[in-house]
Image: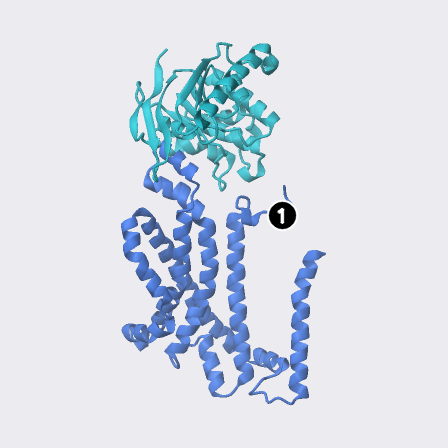
Chain colours: A cyan, B blue
Amino acid sequence: MSIIARLEGASKAFEGGILALDGLTLSIPEGGFVSLLGPSGCGKSTALRLLAGLEAPSAGRREWPGGKPQMGFVFQDATLMPWASVFDNVALPLRLLRRPMAADEIAAALERVGLAAFARAMPRSLSGGMRMRASLARALITRPQLLLLDEPFAALDELTREDLNDALLALHTAQRFSAVFVTHSVGESVYLSNRIIVMSPRPGRVIASFTNDDPLPRPRGYRSSAGFAARCGEISFALRAGMKEAVA
Amino acid sequence: MKRAFSLFLPLIVAALFLGLWEGAVTAFAIKPFVLPAPSAIGLALWRDAGSLGLSALVTLRITVIAFALALVMGVGLAVLFAQSRLIARSLYPYAVALQVTPVVAIAPLILIWVGLEHAQRALLILATIVAFFPILSNTTLGLKSADPNLVALFDLYGAGRWQKLWRLQLPSALPFILAGAKVAGGLALIGTVVAEFVAGSGTSAGLAWRIIEAGNRLQVPKMFAALFVLSALGLAIFAVLSWIEWLALRGWHESTLDRREG
């Protein structure tokens, strides 16, 4: 499988000498769904920003073997423009890229995230889950090859979160993008991805890497299956081992 | 019910205050050139409505043009500052210096420069100087206050500087600009009146001149009437700007949120 983006021994130090990442190496396969799992403040978000090219590594390399891919980014907050309607928010990437924009294309994108009836709504009038759906629609409107998600559902309640996980997997199946999903939830990483990379506390390094061959998208009952529980246990164990090592 | 009450309360205060005032003036037989009774002021307002109204229009015209100039210059300069830190650093101290220098002190100089025969121009310049700073400083702050994640998103899609300005920074700054404009509206009026005072007799037919004129003739009720018109003008400017603010921010900004919502 070809690689769409890669970090090679990437380190990132911020002003004041804080080392967020220390020699991080990981690669994102085309069409794959990779979760970056780690405790808060382990540099997961920084790794994502490096992959996106929003920041440059202080040491090591970031590579896009097939050239800079078209990307979409979803933040922890929906990060919608509060002064613009849902329609205008979703249309933003096309406008910035000066691409021709068809209204029915936006309508279809809203349809796919279940917001067909809310094109004219202002973000303030939507619930947290609906705002996040709009944010997803915006990130996917350019048909990106690489979708980067920075703990997008962390602030949502459990049920909304599960609904959005399913929505995301359905979109992944339909649009075949590569995804990098940053989370600190073990269950979420197992449910969503076929590759889980466990990171250590700051400065972030890769301490373990798992594959989950269960085909995507996962059936509804997947979360209560024995296989799911076993994988979660295994990954939690690795995560805890990393934490202990950091404390010692 | 609550709304009616909050509207009613200031009216009751006004009635009480005016009643006490009227009573005190009558009871202590205070001379009208010391303190005229509200009824006398009302009478002056009625009798001089024509000349006061015309003067109010003169003052209002200068105020509105000065405000518009201040808005264009303030936002324009702030946008320029946002484009280049070098320009901002070199020019901002002078904008502050202009602001902290009392306008009364600059007025005679400006009058000499533009010539007494163009006193209107001097008034306009002075009022603009006074009104300009809150718009500049608020817009400067507003342009910097765009959500950093949205800035990152614009970067991700390779947005240019003008796209960022037009689609992100200016909308983010809008609440700040409007708040600055509300302050500037009042200041434009103050600046106009102060400049009218300094320019003095024969140069202007504005409200300040009515006050000077009435004062010279010891027509104290008319002075009060002119003051009343001036306050009303200030309140009207504030009301109009608040309404524009509400129109522009309705539906998206927190300040327009009905607290009972959500």
| Residue B88 image point, x, y percent | 31, 53
Q: Chain of mark 1?
A: B
Q: Which residue is at a point 39% across and 73% down the rendered structure image?
A: B195
Which residue sits furthest right? B1
Which residue sits furthest front? A248
Q: Is residue A207 left or right of residue B232?
A: left
Using the rendered view, name the quadrant where residue B100 is placed: bottom left
Q: Which residue is at a point 28% across and 52% down the rendered structure image?
A: B87
Quarter in which the N terminus of chain A is drawn: top left
The amino acid on which the numbered mark 1 sits, given as a three-letter code, is Arg
> Relative to the observer, which residue lies in front, B205 or A239?
A239
Quarter in which the C terminus of chain A is drawn: top left
* Element assignment for label 1: loop
Give the class, few, some or many, for how many residues have Cα within 10 Å of label 1's Cα (few <14, many ≥20): few
> Relative to the observer, which residue lies in front, A243 or B167?
A243
- On screen, residue B76 above or below B12: above
Residue B248 seen in render: yes
Circle count:
1
Residue A118 seen in render: no
Q: Which residue is mark 1?
A: B259
Q: Which residue is at a point 62% across and 80% down the rendered structure image?
A: B38
| Residue B111 image point, x, y percent | 32, 75
Q: Is residue B249 left or right of residue B198?
A: right
> Relative to the observer, which residue lies in front, A206 or A79?
A206
- On screen, residue A127 above or below A36: below
| Residue B247 image point, x, y percent | 53, 50
| Residue A112 image point, x, y percent | 52, 23
